[in-house]
């Protein structure tokens, strides 16, 4: 349709206005046609145009749409250039991941293992499926695909003659108001083909929820690749785009690394043997719950002849006994959100941000890729982990926030993952600073040994009188100056720094 216009003479808008006015006079008579009501009054019924009338109206509409289409095409070209730049930056970002993540080594002081998010092959695979298709994905453009390849179809097939007449009349009226009898595109109605043109520079668009991690994570990021499946590359980009504080990001990444590894949002598997249950829930509670099971199940579990069904029955019974709200509120998501009270607290935080999902009645939504990251961030906000507190966090404090019953081995492993996350992000100074804030390491270096009456290790991260005395003694023996009125954390840092 638009190709025809380059090779034919067309009338100006004013000529079309006069032509249609003349046609109206022929039908209605001079007096009625020149009345105050005018040509474009809404109460006048426009009869379907036929033959030359329709052709002339359509001709004007062609030219009017072409001007808008040219502007859309220019916007598309601008977007394509910007997406090409995004593509390049994404490759640079992936290279940075490869150069840092794959070259990192375990931290011998912390003892936490290196848990690479990606292998070399995994990086290349994620690039192919997540980055390259960006320029081929029309959904990434705010302009509908139909704008570029179905304009002719939309105009010629979707509109009746009567509709063409109405649109032409409205268009002519708008043209009469524009300067130099040209369509004023800035005043074009929003939506559809005449939608508001995109910004010439994407940087001019302020992201929704700028500076608010939870809102950014929900509205502006995704943790899935273009294939719709969870992607570590997408998760890393979502974290970078939503969490600007390096301490909070590293604490979250370290926690996710221990809780779910590379699996993404998953559900806790409630399978327990008696030995594992006693380590996790304590000997007394584990034995008490075991005694509630059928005798044949008890016998198989105690004798090591248990089946998967036996272990799952025991696990559900333990969760029903130990978790607030029972097994319905078992661990889910990126940080294994557990207990009804925590689901409720996270739901409250999300609601305060305008995200209403009723997590208490729909706890499985913590597994949804759309909500998993906002849920994790909402939990951190609930427990008070903000820009100020994150910088002053420690191995024991993080363990208390995530799983206060976890062993010292798990707590140190988690803290090692936090330190590694900072190192991999290029925050070496911050990593070294956080490395020193490890209560468990300070206790071990100071010579704390043994277990309590309940069988738990005295290396528990709790800096009580015994631990404080042991650290003071160790520092004195090693000729380390101890500040007056030194806090527990100052002692911890001094011991770790001088070990």
Image (spheres, helix red, strand yellow):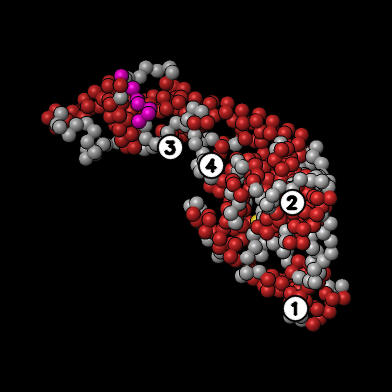
Asked if residue 399 is positioned above or below residue 172 in the image, the reply reads: below
The location of residue 234, given as percent across then percent down, is 66, 42
Classify mark 1: residues with Cα within 10 Å, few (<14), some (14-19) or many (20+).
Answer: few
Most prominent secondary structure in the magenta stretch?
helix
Q: Earlier in the sequence, mark 1 or mark 4?
A: 4
Work out how far the residue at label 1 is from the one at label 3, CA to CA, in angstroms: 66 Å
Is label 4 in contact with label 2 (beta carbons under 8 Å)? no
Classify mark 3: residues with Cα within 10 Å, few (<14), some (14-19) or many (20+).
Answer: few
**Residue appearing at x 84%, y 61% in the figure:** 449
Q: 29 or 467, which is in the foreground? A: 467
What element does badge 2 sit on? Answer: helix
Q: Earlier in the sequence, mark 1 or mark 3?
A: 3
Please name the residue that numbered disc 1 is placed on.
288
Work out how far the residue at label 3 is from the one at label 4, CA to CA, in angstroms: 31 Å
Please name the residue that numbered disc 2 is placed on.
492
Q: Earlier in the sequence, mark 3 or mark 4?
A: 3
Work out how far the residue at label 4 is from the one at label 2, CA to CA, in angstroms: 33 Å
Please name the residue that numbered disc 3 is placed on.
192
Is label 2 in contact with label 1 (beta carbons under 8 Å)? no
Whether residue 416 is visible: yes
Q: Quadrant of residue 133?
A: top right
Work out how far the residue at label 2 is from the one at label 1, CA to CA, in angstroms: 38 Å
Is 181 magenta? The answer is yes
Work out how far the residue at label 1 is from the one at label 4, CA to CA, in angstroms: 49 Å
Residue bounds of the magenta highlight: 180-187
**Residue appearing at x 72%, y 58% in the figure:** 463
């Amino acid at each position: 349709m638009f190709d025809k216009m380059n090779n034919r003479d067309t009338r100006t808008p004013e000529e079309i206005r006069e032509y249609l006015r003349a046609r109206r006079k022929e039908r209605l008579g001079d007096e009625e046609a020149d009345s105050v009501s005018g040509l474009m009054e809404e109460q006048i019924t426009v009869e379907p145009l036929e033959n030359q009338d329709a052709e002339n109206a359509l001709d004007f509409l062609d030219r009017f749409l072409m001007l808008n289409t040219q502007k859309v095409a220019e916007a598309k070209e601008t977007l394509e250039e910007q997406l090409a730049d995004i593509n390049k930056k994404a490759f640079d970002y992936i290279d940075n991941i490869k150069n840092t993540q794959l070259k990192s080594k375990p931290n011998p002081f912390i003892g936490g293992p290196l848990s690479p998010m990606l292998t070399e092959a995994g990086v290349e695979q994620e690039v192919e499926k997540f980055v390259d298709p960006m320029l081929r994905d029309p959904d990434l453009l705010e302009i509908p695909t139909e704008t570029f390849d179905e304009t002719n179809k939309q105009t010629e097939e979707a509109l009746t003659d009567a509709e063409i007449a109405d649109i032409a009349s409205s268009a002519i009226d708008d043209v009469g108001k524009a300067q130099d009898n040209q369509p004023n595109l800035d005043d074009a109605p929003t939506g559809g083909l005449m939608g508001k043109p995109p910004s010439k520079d994407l940087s001019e668009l302020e992201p929704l929820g700028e500076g608010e991690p939870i809102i950014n994570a929900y509205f502006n990021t995704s943790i899935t690749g273009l294939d719709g499946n969870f992607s570590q590359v997408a998760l890393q980009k979502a974290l970078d785009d939503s969490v600007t504080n390096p301490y909070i990001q590293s604490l979250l990444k370290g926690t996710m690394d221990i809780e779910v590894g590379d699996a993404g949002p998953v559900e806790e598997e409630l399978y327990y043997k008696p030995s594992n249950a006693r380590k996790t829930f304590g000997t007394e509670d584990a034995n008490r719950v075991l005694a509630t099971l059928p005798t044949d199940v008890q016998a198989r579990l105690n004798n090591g002849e248990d089946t998967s069904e036996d272990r799952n029955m025991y696990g559900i019974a333990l969760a029903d006994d130990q978790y607030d709200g029972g097994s319905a509120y078992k661990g889910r998501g990126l940080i294994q959100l557990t207990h009804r009270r925590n689901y409720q607290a996270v739901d409250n935080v999300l609601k305060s941000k305008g995200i209403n999902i009723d997590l208490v009645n729909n706890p499985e939504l913590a597994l949804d890729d759309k909500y998993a990251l906002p849920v994790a961030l909402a939990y951190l906000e609930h427990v008070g982990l903000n820009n100020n507190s994150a910088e002053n966090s420690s191995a024991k404090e993080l363990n208390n926030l995530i799983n206060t019953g976890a062993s010292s081995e798990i707590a140190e492993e988690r803290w090692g993952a936090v330190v590694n996350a900072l190192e991999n992000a290029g925050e070496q100074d911050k990593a070294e600073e956080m490395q020193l804030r490890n209560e468990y390491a300070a206790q071990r270096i100071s010579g704390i040994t043994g277990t309590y009456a309940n069988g738990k290790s005295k290396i528990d991260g709790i800096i009580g009188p015994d631990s404080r005395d042991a650290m003071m003694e160790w520092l004195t023996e090693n000729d380390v100056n101890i500040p007056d009125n030194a806090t527990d954390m100052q002692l911890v840092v001094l011991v770790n720094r001088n070990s």
